[in-house]
C-alpha cells in the first residue's frame, strides 16, 4: 500500500516548493487518518524532500528549509550531533561499569 501511495505522490510532485508542501500535507493527512504510520509518513516525506532537492534553485531551497523549520523537522546535522552525544554517554557508562 505504501508503495502505491508513494508512487502517486511522487508522480504529483512537481518542481516547485508549493507542490512539495502540498504532498507533505497529503502525507500528514494520511498519517492522521491512520492510512500510514508515523514512521512511514516521515520516511515518505524525507524521500519526497530528497527527490525535490535534486533540482531546486537557491530561492526554492530557502523556502523549503523555512517550511521544514516551521514544521519542526529534525535536520541531518541535529541527528548527527545527537548520535555523537549518545555514543559519548554510552562510552562514559561503559567506563563507569568497568570501574565498579
Image (cartoon, rainbow, N blue to C red):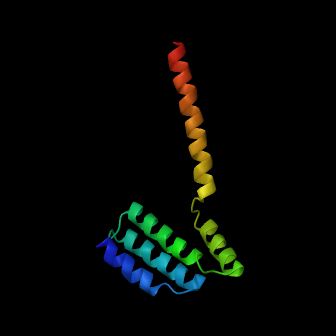
Q: Quadrant of the N terminus?
A: bottom left
Q: Nearer the viewer, residue 4 or 67?
A: 4
- In the visual, does 23 lie left or right of 3? right
The image quarter in which residue 96 lies: top right
Residue 94, image x, y percentages? 52, 25
Question: Looking at the image, which is closer to me, 98 or 33?
Answer: 98
Name which quarter of the figure residue 54 lies in.
Answer: bottom right
Residue lying at the far left in this picture: please name it: 1
Between 27 and 51, the one nearer to me in the picture = 51
Between residues 74 and 7, which one lies in front from this camera angle? 7
Say above or below: 85 vs 51. Answer: above
Q: How many marks?
A: 0
Residue at the spot x=56%, y=37% of the render?
Answer: 87
**x 71%, y 80%: residue:** 59
Up-down relation of residue 79 to residue 69 (above or below): above
Expressed as whole percent of the image width and height from the top left, the position of residue 64 reads 62, 75
Q: Residue at x 54, y 79 (%)?
A: 21
Counting from the top left corner in percent of width and height, residue 32 is at: 39, 69
User: Seen from this angle, which residue lies furthest front?
Assistant: 54
Amino acid at each position: 500500500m505504501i508503495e502505491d501511495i508513494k508512487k502517486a505522490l511522487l508522480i504529483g510532485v512537481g518542481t516547485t516548493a508549493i507542490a512539495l508542501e502540498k504532498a507533505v500535507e497529503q502525507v500528514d493527512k494520511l498519517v492522521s487518518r491512520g492510512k500510514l504510520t508515523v514512521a512511514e509518513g516521515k520516511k515518505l516525506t524525507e524521500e519526497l524532500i530528497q527527490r525535490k532537492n535534486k533540482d531546486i534553485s537557491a530561492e526554492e531551497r530557502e523556502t523549503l528549509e523555512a517550511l521544514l523549520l516551521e514544521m519542526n523537522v529534525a535536520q541531518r546535522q541535529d541527528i548527527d550531533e545527537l548520535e555523537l552525544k549518545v555514543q559519548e554517554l554510552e562510552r562514559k557508562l561503559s567506563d563507569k561499569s568497568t570501574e565498579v
